[in-house]
Image: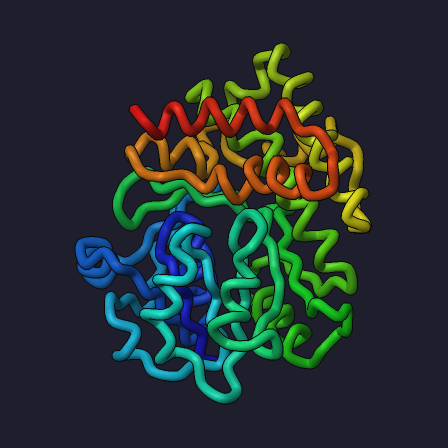
Amino acid sequence: MRVAIVGAGSLGSVFGGVLADAGVEVYLVSRHQDYVDKVNHDGLRLVEDSGERVTWPNVTADAGTVGEVDLVIVIVKSFDTREAMTASKVLVGPETTVLSLQNGLGNEEVLAELFGWSRIIFGRTFVGGDSVSKGRIVTGLKGKPTVIGELNGEFSMRSMEISEIFNLAGLLTEVSDNILGVVWNKLLVNVSTGALAGITGLSYGLLYQVPDLLPVAVAAVNEGVAVAKAKGIELPNEDAEEIWLSAGRGQPASFRTSILQSLERGSKTEIDFINGAVVRLGAEVDVPTPVNRTLVACIKGLEFK
């Protein structure tokens, strides 16, 4: 299987490195030429609890040099989805599957507009990636699942094949018949920690040492649970405190959430697609979301600095 990953950030690099290390023909597509040059010269370094390993995925800034592939994994920031995939259309042929492993809500709809619903597989991963320097990523894989599935709940051959390839590479993966519930569950995980880490500037090792953050996280998640129920979503987990705890489980103490990483780089965050999605959808179903609205406002203020 030929695999292209659009979005060679922290998480995309982890997937690209792990798949390449398992012998999969994988191409990382990055818009940053300095990243491409660095990884092609020195390899991609993954730092795990077990040590550091060097992997050698194919890396390019030009999707046209790759051509059509069997599977496109989309891991760009949510606000970049349309632009990135429009520029990468050459990767998608008649038999190509497009798998979104992005955070938040709304990405699959954009991909379906570009390529049609029949090509799209939903997916979410609880694997984390934290870029500590160019081409060097801290990650935690142990016990961190990736879940994929068809929107109609069928266990299709393509989803089973992708799951098998991921598992052989060491990416714990399962196929779900309730992928919308999984998508929402991952959203709630991000809701619990992303904005709070961004506001406080704390890594996971410190975030969980501040007791006053727990009730805020629980309240934000419970608002999300209420919105999901109002929309008829069947959630795999509705325990807000467990969702908060699960976010940091298996991650290095130094791990920083995606929102915190973005703020530290001075770049835009995905807050509109995470806590902002809870606020937006809550308004549609008349569920109040004051905690999430406050967290969004705080992150917007930090982005403005």
- Horizontal side of residue 133 vs 159, given as left or right: left
Instruction: Say above or below: 94 vs 255.
Output: below
The one of 301 and 71 positioned closer to us in this rendering: 301
Instruction: Quadrant for the C terminus, please.
Output: top left
Q: Please determine whether, in this image, residue 89 is positioned above or below residue 12.
A: below
What is the quadrant of residue 26 in the picture?
A: bottom left
Which residue appears at 49% of the width and 88% of the height?
94
Nearest the camera: 128 or 89?
A: 89
Pick whichever, 293 or 49, lies toward us. Answer: 293
Say whether residue 110 is visible: yes
Q: Where does residue 304 sit, x and y in percent of width and height? A: 32, 27
Q: Which residue corresponds to the image point at 65% horizontal and 63% vertical from the top-left? A: 148
Question: Residue furthest toward the bottom?
Answer: 94
User: Which residue is depicted at the point 46% across and 42% down?
Assistant: 270
Above-or-below relation of 69 to 199: below
The answer to whether 278 is drawn above or below residue 167 in the figure is: above
Point out residue 229 in the picture as x, y percentages from the top left corner. 80, 43
> Is residue 250 shown to the viewer in this render?
no
Left or right: residue 160 versus residue 2 is right
Coloring basis for residues: rainbow
Q: Is residue 271 left or right of residue 248?
A: left
Q: Is residue 212 left or right of residue 64?
A: right
Q: Position of residue 234 (x, y in %)?
A: 81, 50
Picture coordinates of residue 129, whole percent (x, y): 45, 44
- Give the mark count: 0
Could you tell me which residue is drawn at 69 percent across and 31 percent down? 221
Asked whether 92 or 170 is in front, the reply is: 92
